[in-house]
Image (spheres, grey):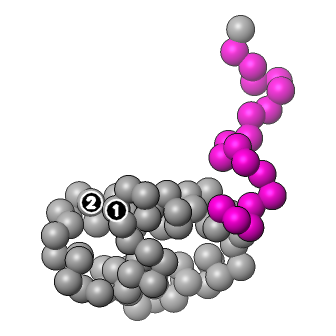
Amino acid sequence: MKLYTHTLSEADISRIVEMAWEDRTPFDAIYAQYCLNEATLIALMRSHLRSSSFKMWRKRIAGRTTKHLSKRGFRVGRFVCPSQRTR
C-alpha cells in the first residue's frame, strides 16, 4: 500500500488527511479524487498520524454512517436552516 503514497505530494496527503477527518466527506469522495480505497486510506492515515491520533480517528469513524454513501439517510451533504436563506 505504500507504493501508491510515494506519488502523492505533501499537499495531497495533507488534504486527504483533512478529508478523512471531516464527518461528512465520504470515503467514496476520497476514492474519486485520489483513487484511495478505504483500506489504503487507513494505511495512509496510520503512517502519517501519531499513534494516538490514528486511534482517535479510527474510534471516531468506526460507527459513522456519513462516511459511507450507501449507509447515508440523506442525499444532500449539507444542512441549510430555513431561517438562513439568502434573498
Q: Position of residue 80 (x, y in %)?
A: 74, 34
Taking the image as shown, residue 46 lies to the left or right of residue 13, namely: right
Instruction: Evaluate whether residue 28 shows in this view.
Output: yes
- Label 2: state its secondary structure: helix
> Mark 1 against mark 2, which lies toward the viewer?
1
Task: Identify the residue shown where x is 69% and y is 15%.
Answer: 86
Task: Identify the residue shown where x is 28% and y is 66%.
Answer: 13
Q: Quadrant of residue 78?
A: top right
Please state which of residues 62 and 31 is positioned toward the viewer in this rendering.
31
- Range of residues picked out in magenta: 69-86
The residue pinned by badge 1 equals: 34
Q: Which of marks 1 and 2 is nearer the N terminus?
A: 2
Taking the image as shown, residue 8 lies to the left or right of residue 25, namely: left
Q: Where is residue 11 in the image (x, y as percent from the top left)?
A: 23, 58
Majority secondary structure in the magenta region: loop
Q: In this view, does 73 lie above or below 46?
A: above
**Residue 12 numbered tag:** 2
